[in-house]
Amino acid sequence: MLKLLKGIWLVFLHAFTRPVTIQYPDVKPYLPPRWRGRIILSRDPDGEERCVGCYLCSVACPVDCIALQATEDEHGRRYPAWFRINFSRCIFCGYCEEACPTYAIQLTTDFEMSEYDRRNLVYEKEDLLISGTGKYPGYNFYRVSGVQIGGKDKGEAEHEASPIDLRSLMP
Amino acid sequence: MTGAFYLASLVAVVSTGLVITSLNAVHALLYLIVSFLGVAVVFFLLGAPFIAMLEIIIYAGAIMVLFVFVVMMLNLGRQAIEQESAWLMPRIWVGPSILSATLLVELLYLFGFGVLSQAGGIMGQAPKQVSVVLLGPYLIGVELASMLLLPGLVGAYHLGRDLRNEDA
Amino acid sequence: MNEVASRLPIIAGVLTMVVTLSALLIWLERRLLGFWQERYGPNRVGPFGLLQVVADMIKIFMKEDWVPPFADKAVFVIAPAVIIVTVLMSFAVVPFTPSIVVADLNVGLLFFLAMSSLSAYSVVLAGWASNNKYSLLGGLRASAQMLSYEVFMGLSLMGVVMLTGSFNLGDIVEAQRDLWFCIPQILGFIIFLIAGLAETKRIPFDIPEAEAELVAGFHTEYSGMKFGMFFVGEYLGIILISAMITVLFFGGWQGPWLPPAVWFWIKTFLFICLFILLRAALPRLRFDQLMTFGWKVMLPLALVNLAVTGALVLIGHPPK
C-alpha cells in the first residue's frame, strides 16, 4: 500500500520536470553528421560523376531497393546510364555507402521526404545526383586509382609508379 | 401528477406484458427492468421515495444484473427462441391467463365498489419513518429475513470454496 | 407547470456545463498525462491545444457509424445511451451551490446509488449485444466488478448519512459547516474513492476494457459517435464521482472568501486531477485480485467503518 502511494507521489513530482519532447517542426533536432538519411550520388571535385557503375551498392542492399545500369563513355570512363532508388523500400541501413568503392553513394542528414503518392518515392538519377562532393571533398577516384581512361594513362595516378615494361625486366 | 402516475403504470404494465411475449431471453429481462423502473416511478409518485430507490438499487440494479449475467453465460441461441415461440401457443397460455383474468376482474370489482379507495391517500414516507417502522413493530420480520439470508450466504460460500487449496 | 418552467434554466445550465466539461476533460487528461510522462500532450490545435477537443469531435462525428450485422441491433444502440442517461440523471441531485440544484430530493444519495447501479447495464448490454467473445468477456467482467463494488460503495456512504441524519445532499453539505466529513469519515472517504474508481472503470480497475487482453473489451465493436458516447460517459462519470466526493466528504460549496460555485468546482477539479494521476501511476489489477480486494478487504473495512461510526453517533446522541 505504501509502495503504491510512493509511486503515485513520484509520478506526481514528474509534473515539475521539463518535458523531454523536442517540438519538431518548430525546433529542428540536432542530427549527427553521420546520420543515415536520404541517399545521394556525389560528384568528384572536377564535377564528374563519381559512380562507376560497379553494382556493389545494389548487391549490398538488403531490401533490393537500388537498381542501375552501367555504361561507358568514349574515354573509357564507366558511369550509370540510369540509377534508381526506391525509397519506399529503403531501410536506411547505410550498407550501400559502406560498399561503395568510390564514395559516390552517400547518406545525408535529410529525412523530410514524405510524399502523398507512393510512386513519388522512386528517385531517378537526376533526383539523386548532386553537384557537390558530399562528405569527402578532395577525393577523386580516377586520380588515385590505376584505371586507364582517356587523358590518363597507366602510372599517371597519384602515388602510382609507372608501369614496368616486362620485356626490360631481364636479369 | 395523475397523468404521470397513469403513464408510469402503463409503461410498467405494457413492459410486463412484453416480458412474457418476447422470445429473446435478454430482451425479456430488459423489459422486466423497464417494468421495475415503472413501478419505482409509481412508488415515487405515491410518496414513498425510499421504496422507489430501493426498487431501483436492489431489483433493477443488482438482481437483474445477475439475471442478465447468467443469461449471457448460457449463450442461448436460435433453438431457445424456437422453443420459446413453441411455448407461446394458446394451449399453453390459456390456463394461466384465465386465472389472472379472474384476479383482475376481482381487483376491478373491489376498486369499483370503493373498498380500496383509501389506498390513494398514502402519506409521504421519509426514509426515517420507514426505518423506525422496520426496526420497531416489524423487527421480527427483519430478523426472519436476515436469518433466511444467512443460510444463503453460508451455502454460497460453501459452494464457492476453493477445493484445490483444501487438500494441501 | 410554473415550477417546472422556473427550473428549466438550471437544468439547461447544468447540462451544458457538465457536457462541455466532459469534453474539455478529454483534453485535460491528455495534457496532464503528458506532463506526468515528461512530454507535452496535444498542443498544436489552438491555444494550448484546447481546440483539439473540437477536432476530435469533428473526426468522431464524420466516422462511419457501423452496426455489425451479427449484433443485436436494438440493444446495441440502446447500450451507449444508457450510460449517458444514467450519469446525467445523477447530476440532477448534485448541489452545485445552495441554490443551483436541479432536484432537491430527500433521497438524493440513494438516487445517485440507484443511477450508478443502472449504469452497469450499459457495459453489460454492450458486451452482450456485440456478439463478440472479447466484448462478452468485457461485459461479464464489468457486471461482476460493478456489482461487487457497488455493495461497499453504498456501505461506505452510510457513515456520512449517520452523521447527517439525512439522505439529502444539500443537508449533507450543510452538516459539514464546522468539520468536513473527510476527517471523521477518512475510512469511508478512501473506500468511496476506490469504489468510485471501479464504478467509472478507470485505470487500476479498467479490466472490462483491458486493451492488453480483450482488444477493447465491451466497446470492441463500437465506432463513430456510439463509441464517443461511451467515452463521454466515462468522463461524465469521473466528473460525477469527483463532485460526489466533494459534496460528501469535502464540504461541497463551503469555503471562505470565494463564491460557493467556485469552491465547488475547485474541489471537484482537484479530484478529477487525482483520478488522472492514478491513471498515470498505477498498473491494471488482475481480475481475481480485484475481486479478492473488493470482498475481502474493502467490504470488511466498510462494515467496520459503519459499526464504529454508528457506535460513536449513539454515544454522542443517545436515542431518547
Image: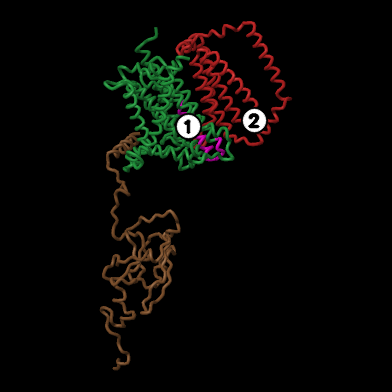
Chain colours: A brown, B red, C green
Label 1 Cα crowd, 10 Å radius (few <14 / some 14-19 / many 20+): many
What's the magenta region?
A: C128-150
Between C236 and A50, which is closer to the camera in this rendering?
Answer: A50
Residue type pointed to by label 2? Leu
Question: Residue C96 magenta-drawn?
Answer: no
Label 2 Cα crowd, 10 Å radius (few <14 / some 14-19 / many 20+): many
In the rendered structure, the answer to whether residue B147 lies left or right of residue B17 reads: left
Report in which chain the residue with disc 2 lies: B
Q: CA distance from mark 1 to mark 2?
A: 29 Å
Marking on residue A52: none
Q: Main secondary structure of the magenta part?
A: helix
Give the structural element (helix, strand or loop) at label 2.
Answer: loop
Q: Residue at x 38, y 34 (%)?
A: C24
The correct choice, above or below, for C89 with respect to C218 in the image is: above
Measured as percent of width and height from the top left, residue C177 is found at 31, 17
Question: Residue C138 magenta-drawn?
Answer: yes
On the rendered image, what quadrant is the C terminus of chain C found in? top left
Give the tally of numbered discs.
2
Q: Which residue is mark 2?
A: B23
Q: Residue furthest bottom?
A: A171
Between A167 and B133, which is closer to the camera in this rendering?
Answer: A167
